[in-house]
Amino acid sequence: MSISITVNDAKDIATITIIGSFDFSLFNEFRAGYSDLTKPYKTYVVDMSMVEYLDSAALGMLLSMRNAIDADSNIQLTGANAFIKNILMISRFDKRFDIQ
Amino acid sequence: MMKLLCVDSEPVYREIISLCAEKEGVEVKSVASYEEAILTFESYAPDIVTLDVIVKGGSGYDLVQKLKALSGNRFVPMIFLASHTADSVMDKCFKAGADDFIPKPFNEVLFNIRLKTHMRHVELMKEMYRKNKALTYYQKMIEREHEMAHHVLDHIQTRSEKNSEQVAITRLSAASFNGDLALVKTRSDAARLVFVGDFTGHGLPASIGALPVMQTFFDAVDDLVCVNELAVRINRILFSILPDYMFCAGYLILMTQEGEITYWGGGMPNAFIRRSNGLVDYLHSNHMPLGILSASEFEADLQNNKLNAGDTLVIVSDGVLELKNCSEEMLGDKKVKNLISNAYAEKSLITAQQIIEQQLAEYLGESEQLDDITLVALRSPCL
C-alpha cells in the first residue's frame, strides 16, 4: 500500500499518507483517498514525509484535490523533503495549500 | 471446464483415470495409442495430459516431446502414470518434458491431489497469459499515442524560428514524451517573442494543450500583443480546456532588439543569463503555472531584465536539471550553471549550443534519458 488514510473525528482531521513515489500511478488511489471519506473534514493533511519523488502529475492531483474539497477546508502538505518543497514552491503551491 | 487427455494402453487404467478426473469436474478423453494421442491432442486441445512410458505404437518419451512441441505457447502439464518406476525411467521422463510422475498402481487420493495442483497451475498460467496479452496491447497503444504526440509537437515546432546566431533551440526527446514546448518568433517590430513550456503528464494528453497555445502564441506575434496580455490569454484557454489536474509551466519572454527583456514565468525553474564576464544571473518564475487559476485570480505582472552585448539567456526545462547520470545523481542547478557559464563563453551561439548538447550527453553517459530535454538560448540581436 503506497497510500493510507487515517481520520481523527475529534480533531476533524483526515490524513493521507503517501509512501514512495508520488506520481501518476497513484491517480485513482489518491482521489479515492479524499473522495471516499464518509464526511468532509475541516483539515486535510497530505503527509509526504515518506515521499522520495514527486512529478508534475502529482502536482495536478493535488490541485484536483483542492478543487474537490470545500474551499473552507484547509489542506496541509507536510513533511516534504527539500527537493519536493522546492518543486512545490516553484509552482507557488503556497497560494493554494498550507505547506509545512 | 478443464479437459484431460488420457493416453494408456490398458483399458482398466483408462477407466480409473477417467473416473477420478470426472469426479474433480474434469472432462476426459481416453486413447490407447501413440497415433491416436497425437491426433486427439490436436483436435481436442486438452489442458492436461496423462500418459504411460509404454504406449502402443511408440514410446512415452517421444510422445511427451511431441506433445510439448505441439502445445506451442500453451502450458499443458504432462503427467506420467508409469508401471516402470526405476529412477532412470523417471529421470528420462522429466528430461523428455514431463511435469509430474506417479508410479502405477497409484493411490486415488494422491492422483486427485496432484491433478488439482496441476489444474491450479494451468489456471494461473492462463490468467498470466491473458494479462500479458492485455498489457502488450496497452503498451502498443501507448507507444502509438506517444508517437502521435511527438508528431503533433514536432509539427508545431516547425513554425518556430530556425536556429541562428541569436536563437538556438535544443529539444532531445525521451522515449516517454513529457510535453515540452519551445517557440521563438521575431515580430514585425524586430522584438523576439519566446515561449518555453512544460505540460503536466506524459504522452498524448500532454500534447493536447500545445495546439491552442501555439495558435495563441503566433497570433500574438502577428498582432504585437504584449506579454502580460498573452499570459492572460494562454492561461484562460488552458484553464477552460484542461482538466483540473493538468497545467503548463512556462516562460513568456519578449526581448527587444536592444536586449530589453520583459517576462512572465510560472512554475518553471530559474532561467540563466550568462553575462559576458562569465557570471550568471537568474530569471525567476514567480507565478503559478498556466491553466490553474481562473481569470479573476490570475496574476499577469511581469519582471524585467536586460541582455547586454555578449550575454546569453538560457532557458532550460526541468528535464535538464533532473538529468541523471550512471550513478543516479541529478545534474542540478549548480552543475547546469557551470556548464552554461563555460559553454556560452564561445563566440558562436550555434557552436556553444553544440558544446552544451555534447556535455549533457557526456553527463548522461550510458544511462537512459527519462524526460524530454529543452534548452533555449538567446542572444541580443544588437551585437
Image (cartoon, coloured by chain):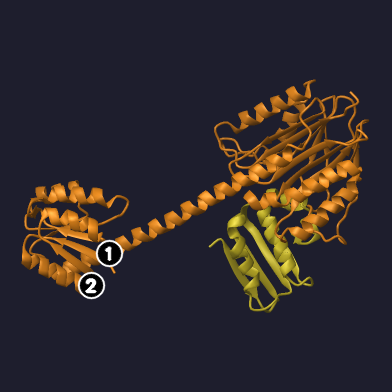
Chain colours: A yellow, B orange
- Give the residue at mark 1: B119
Question: Looking at the rendering, in which quadrant would you find the C terminus of chain B?
Answer: top right
Q: What residue do we see at 80% from left, 37% from top?
A: B184
Q: Secondary structure at mark 1?
A: helix
Tell which of A99 and B117 is nearer to you: B117
Q: Which mark is residue B206?
A: none
What's under tag 1, amino acid-wise?
Met
Tell which of B63 and B175 is nearer to you: B63
Q: In the rendered image of this protein, does residue B306 appear above or below residue B288?
A: above
Tell which of B363 and A64 is nearer to you: A64
Q: What residue do we see at 16% from left, 56% from top?
A: B37
- Give the residue at mark 2: B24
The reply, left or right, for residue B111 in relation to residue B57 is right
What's under tag 2, amino acid-wise?
Glu
Q: Is residue B309 visible?
A: yes
Q: Are marks 2 and 1 in contact (CB under 8 Å)?
A: yes
Question: Looking at the rendering, in which quadrant would you find the N terminus of chain B?
Answer: bottom left
The chain ID associated with circle 2 is B
Q: What residue do we see at 17% from left, 60% from top?
A: B50
Q: Secondary structure at mark 2?
A: loop
Q: Quadrant of residue A32?
A: bottom right
